[in-house]
Amino acid sequence: MKTAAITLRLSAELAKNLGRIARGRGVPKSQLVREAVARYLAPQDSEARAPHVTATSLASRWKEMPRLTSDEASEFWKDIEVARTELPALRPGWE
């Protein structure tokens, strides 16, 4: 990956915070700045989101959507039941 050097001027307070966070994470300040710029320039959720699906559009496609046969649904249910018994018990999240 080619890189380009830039000069960046920060207020004393921002520079101090950048240095403090970089030391705390054990990374160079330039890495933090690269990560921050990448996040800032990344597409926002609304830009990256799939097209909005409405109930009307879903209803119009409902008839064409694939469905399980009765036998497939029964087998799927059996697989779920087997998985429930074979998976380890969940640990409490907050202790």
Image (cartoon, helix red, strand yellow):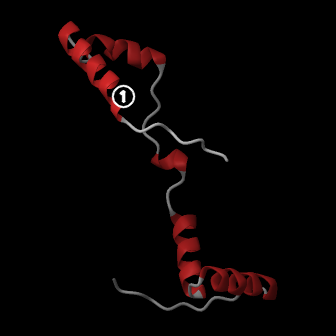
Furthest toward the right, the residue is 13
Q: Position of residue 42 (x, y in %)?
A: 50, 62
Q: Position of residue 68 (x, y in %)?
A: 23, 14
Residue 27 falls in which quadrant of the image?
bottom right
Lateral position of residue 20 relative to residue 45, left or right: right
Residue at left offset 49%, top offset 48%: 47
Q: Nearer the viewer, residue 72 or 44?
A: 72
Lateral position of residue 76 relative to residue 52, left or right: left
Residue at left offset 59%, top offset 92%: 7
Please tell me whether mark 1 sits on a helix, a strand or a loop.
helix
Furthest toward the top, the residue is 70
Q: Mark 1 — residue?
A: 85
In this rendering, the answer to whether 34 lies above or below 74 is below
Q: Nearer the viewer, residue 48 or 92?
A: 92
Q: Residue 16, can we see it?
A: yes
Q: Amino acid at mark 1?
A: Thr
Mark 1, other Cα within 10 Å: few <14 / some 14–19 / many ≥20: few
